[in-house]
Amino acid sequence: MALQSLDIKQRSATTTSPPGVRAEATVELAKLIDTTKCIGCKACQTACMEWNDLRDEVGDCNGTYDNPRDLTAESWTVMRFAEYENPKGDLEWLIRKDGCMHCADPGCLKACPSPGAIVQYANGIVDFHEEHCIGCGYCIAGCPFDVPRISKKDNKAYKCTLCSDRVAVGLEPACVKTCPTGAITFGTKQQMQHDAAERVVDLKSRGFENAGLYDPAGVGGTHVMYVLHHADQPGLYNGLPERPHVSAMVRLWKGAAKPLALGGLLVAALAGWLNYVRVGPKEADADDERAAERAKERTDG
Amino acid sequence: MTNHWVDIKNADVVLIMGGNAAEAHPCGFKWVVEAKAHNKARLIVVDPRFTRSASVADLYVPIRPGTDIVFLGGVINYLLSNDAIQHEYVNNYTDLSFIVREDYAFADGLYSGYDADKHKYDRSTWDYERGPDGFVKSDPTLQHPRTVFNLMKQHYARYTPDMVASACGSPQDKFLEVCKLLASTSTPTRAATIMYALGWTQHSVGSQMIRTGAMVQLLLGNIGVAGGGMNALRGHSNIQGLTDLGLLSNLLPGYMTLPSQAEQDYAAYIAARALKPLRPNQMSYWQNYNRFFVSLMKSWWGAAATADNHWGYDYLPKLDKSYDMLQTFEMMTEGKVNGYLCQGFNPLAAAPNKAQMTAALSKLKFLVIMDPLATETSEFWRNFGEHNDVDAALIETEVFRLPTTCFAEEDGAMVSSARWLQWHWKGVEPPGESKSDISIMAGLYTRIRRLYETDGGAVPEPVVKLSWPYARPAEPTPEELAREYNGKALADVFDPKDPTKVLRKAGEQLAGFGELREDGSTSSGCWIYCGAWTEAGNLMARRDNSDPTGIGQSRNWAWSWPANRRVMYNRASCDPAGKPFNPARSLVSWNGKAWGGVDVPDFKADEDPAGGMGPFIMNPEGVARFFARGGMAEGPFPEHYEPFESPLGYNPLHPKEPRSTQNPAARIFKRDREALGKVDAFPHVATTYRLTEHFHYWTKHVRLNAVMQPEQFVEIGEVLAKDLGVKAGDRVRVSSNRGFIKAVAVVTKRIKPMTIEGKTVHTVGIPIHWGFKGVAKPGFLANTLTPVVGDANSQTPEFKAFLVKVERI
Amino acid sequence: MAEVTRREFLKFTGASLAGSSLVLLGFTPETALAEVRQFKLARATETRNTCPYCSVACGVLMYGTGDRAKNAKSAIFHIEGDPDHPVNRGTLCPKGASLIDFLHSDSRLQYPEYRAPRSAEWQRISWDEAFDKIAGLMKKDRDQNFVAKTADGLTVNRWLTTGMLAASASSNETGYITHKVMRSLGVLSFDNQARV
């Protein structure tokens, strides 16, 4: 079945090209997260932990519903809650399931220096292979959505796999299956775009004039997309970036690496720079401020 | 639920009020989302808090806790004033045209027959007038001043939009939007559903809140139709089953009732329940009460139940009053209860006023806990610091804690909110030495019986003669018990129309309650479950999910009581001639000879509609009642009364009549009345509730759920937080006149201050899920705060509206 | 590469580039295999059940080790929604999706226990001892306090000094037999979770 294909499209830090003969046989898959159907129940969070045999810490309450408070090596998806009073004076509780977007042009993979630690399958899934991970954290610097996290236990990077083990045998990811309201669906990217268009028509009939699909071009489109009531203001949803893109430095790094002619000094400079952006602020994109703050707080790795 | 979960997708308007389906029933709520996405449905949420249900609603309206009757009474007033009712439905299928007795009266919030000393009504005047033929008098022109229609119109004329705004604090424009949306379903082709839960039941006027909702639905013609109904969302997986099976102080299985001690005469007991029709050619199905009752007694006492001993009628305990939970805890507090068994129930956490509960349990001689988990109740005697500050050395109670199996470790049936009996299968052995509850009850019973057989004792007959036909007496199987509650023929059962024709041979499982007999030739442990396990096998285990007409009627999935019917009162989905009001969502119809369709008709199968039989076949009138007659403790029409702890201290509808401030017919014990707090000391209105990440007091034992909501919190609005100097994440102390809890403050825009009768009222939200056992962070039991006063009909305690004071720690 | 920590890596890249650059540039002695995690349900035994929490009554599939052969002791290791179920259609809420941790909760009781008056501890007892003691206490209380007739001669056959709260998540079969037993004893203080 085409949907089960996990043929490789690209691998991190690998110059040999993957087998390409079957590439045309596969379909591009996507997860559609409809924030307008989401009730923030966190079933996706528990189903994710349950399926992937993860158990995050029992934390505490900081005066919000957000728990676990941020993505971690054991929480690959979290709900982010935002209370928004619209111009009419009505309250909207905007809830966004955060996690890996499975970019078509994945910044993490581009930045990763360890061969085969990050792969992109032909179906669009971007997967981490921890046995090859060296814990350098460049994937975090390369990610425009601030998603990967390095575990304190084993110093390796983790994030949502889009349940590649389930998808490989023809099943949907665990979060998709469990979602009580059908806010998360899974299928071909084309089907998801079609469904999203239908949702947008319905939302417009209910007064959400700027309803739309979030599938940002700056990262080549994503294999996790959102339906938003306010697609004109993604920042309302806990700082969802308005125009995410792979940073120019990561592009340069990949571009220079491929000809195998990179000088040592440049590598050192790049490594130093990448480390700086991991612990210091990233590019001063207004959308990224929140992510940058979190990056600053992070002490792991 | 009158309807069922999947049917919600057929609704055009969904009103969630007195419940929070998205949060407490997420997978059922998907059908609301489906109605919105594919049926263009509009979702209304009316709630003191902007909930997770509200987060996907088209219209959210805030309401002060405990004022739902004012809101819904206002809707009734709107529908009647604007003639937004389904005339053909109400004229034919309700008591709208019936004439009420002349001596019925209502003034200053009190109905005729009130005894202020006893807090009780003599309900005899709350009835229809009878004609010379013994039937109820009616005026189909609705001109008579004492028709139910005119009395109801008059009653709710006081429930104006201004009153709604003032008493409920709901913005008037939003209230009117709700009215308009609901009114849009008064056409025969549109349906609204109402979904509610403990947000209505846990009030001192909870039953009447539900009734008011049902009256709205009747006016709109929304009962019995696909996409309509009054849908009670039960809170626990088999609370519907346990209620069906009559595990309440005054019930027997199948909603039969235990006799009172005045009912010494068996025939009179039956006659009082086998109600004769109040209108010509009505079915009045309870006329078969004796068949249900005798069959039950044959299941329980077998050969010892004979015609001569009135089928063992004397064996049944007789009531002098209700022995509901609140009454029992009052007796326990007074030292009048010695032994108590808790089977999968954690009353220290679940019952009101934890301090009093602790005192009550400490007076017991013995307490037996049967549970898969280590509950708070099982360790009520152990000190857990400020979360359970007791001294074990002072508590005499002997406690037994027996480990039980849970769902994964046993076979059996559970009944969903939609009345579906679904069989489940054991997948694994239980941990350690755990036993099933069935084995525990059998283990206790067989030992007690042996003691009575060998030693004698007080009235041993009901115990030693109990029918116990199980292959292994100490280990009855779920299959044996399921077959028993379905029932079987004890002798050949004959066709009443043709006495030579055997319908069911002796020894066979019965196919349905139509085969039950009053002569002792049948047994059935719960008549409404008759049909669940027939000669065709265990129908509860069926797994055919096909839905032939696409409206969600998968009638071959499991088995639904009664008679595998999926939508109750479905005959009312057709016009008087038997044609569906809405052919696009047809459930049943009359084909000229018989009733049929995608559902099992809730009607006599071959009854020609021309005969005028009404669709509400359990009522002796054959129609639905706006006027409850003597059915409700506090009056035939719902009236608003304030919560027992009211921020006002008076009833806005009757500011000058103190007797009608609170429910005049509520029972409250002296000790509990004294424990009520007043608004000057406890200025904030509190309401308790569930969060979606947790289930009751169980999932604090579950690691994954503890990760999702680890620590106890309360929710307060931004304005109150500012007044108190509290920021999100600060710890606060919340106290009532009965105790205090400490928790983290969630400061939110989702709770707003309300202006009630010109005064600012703040609401405090108190999730219930924490306690001193489990893997979540230890916390206080929320019921430390709640008052001990119940609804006057059901004695469900008032957890949804009481007074507290919030302070910064 | 796995044993190289990030700190070491950074130190290394800062100090000397000769060794690491090859790796950084994509040369590695190992083959970069891309394999997904093994699908863990492949031959697990599936059992159909009903979620024990709220009354939506979602269908669940429980996955256990072993194939029910005599020598294989099953353990449930994963639970997910039953896609055939007409109501939940495979979905589960955060409680249902976490059922595995309920099943294996550290709070699960393992054996009968007894707490003596004024004691601060549990002591383990056998089932026989528990049954015999409880049955004895119940009979004694019933014999002492049973009301067969009222003072004015009405037959009432009730036992008010012992009461019971019945479960909310137990099966119909449990509920049925519990009611049968408790009413035969004359118990009226009898309730279930329906009120709260």
Image (tube, rainbow, N blue to C red):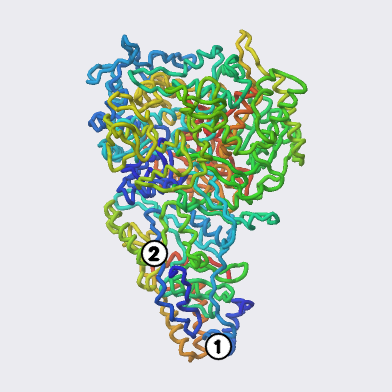
Q: Amino acid at mark 1?
A: Leu
Quadrant of the image occupied by residue C167: top right
Does the image show residue A144? no
SS for tag 2? strand
Q: Considering the numbered disc 1 on the image, is that residue within a helix, a strand or a loop?
A: helix
Mark 1 lies on residue = C22
Q: Is residue B706 above or below residue B133?
A: below
Q: Is residue A285 above or below residue A272?
A: above
**Can you say which quadrant of the picture contains the N terminus of chain C?**
bottom right
Residue B142 percent across, percent down from the top left: 24, 21
Residue B256 locus on image (x, y percent): 50, 24
Return the residue found at the far top. C152
Residue B519 location (% of width, % of height): 53, 19
Farthest residue in the front direction? B500
Viewer-side residue, A279 vs B420? B420
Q: Could you tell me how far apart the alpha carbons at marks 1 and 2 are, in whole angstroms?
A: 37 Å
Viewer-nearest residue: B186 or B158: B186
Judge depth for marks 1 and 2 and give the one in front. Answer: 2
Q: Which residue is mark 2?
A: A225
**Residue depicted at 43% across the width and 83% down the height:** A252
Task: Answer above or below: position of A138 versus A297.
Answer: below
What is the crowding at mark 1: few (fewer than 14 residues within 10 Å), some, or many (at least 20)? few
Q: Which mark is drawn over residue B260?
A: none
